[in-house]
Image (spheres, rainbow, N blue to C red):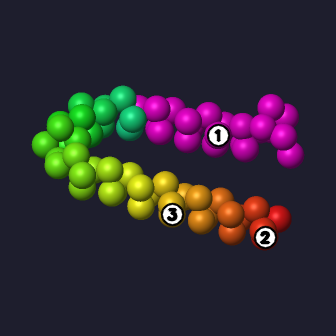
Amino acid sequence: MRWGLQKGLAQGAVACGLLIIAAASVSLAPWGARVAHRTDTRRLKRVFAVIRVGLALYMALQSQRG
């Protein structure tokens, strides 16, 4: 199934999920900015590095599974 060809309930679920993610992103952005400015630069870089490595490993494993 392609992203642009979803029908019925699946299409509504995707739209609802997209709206929830967008609303959460917009409403939590100021909080995230405050936390980022208060956090030590070195620690913040390490946290983002761990997230990026974890995401890369997840994507690699998912590509192997098919």
The residue tagged 2 is: 65
What amino acid is at disc 1?
Val
Q: Nearer the viewer, residue 1 or 49?
A: 49
The dot on residue 54 is 3
* Coordinates of residue 19 in the picture (x, y in percent): 51, 32
| Predominant SS along the magenta part | helix
Q: Residue at x 59, y 65 (%)?
A: 57
Left-right relation of 61 to 31: right
Left-right relation of 64 to 32: right
Circle nearer the N terminus (3, 1): 1
* 6 relative to 45, above or below: above
* Coordinates of residue 49 in the picture (x, y in percent): 41, 55
Q: Quadrant of residue 10?
A: top right
Q: Residue at x 86, y 46 (%)?
A: 1
Circle nearer the N terminus (2, 3): 3
What amino acid is at disc 3?
Gly
Q: Is residue 31 visible?
A: no
Q: CA distance from mark 2 to mark 3?
A: 17 Å
Magenta region: 1-23
Left-right relation of 40 to 61: left
Q: Nearer the viewer, residue 26 or 10?
A: 26
The dot on residue 14 is 1
Q: In front: mark 2 or mark 3? A: 3
Q: Crowdedness of circle 3 by 10 Å Cα count: few (<14), some, many (20+)?
A: few
What amino acid is at disc 2?
Arg
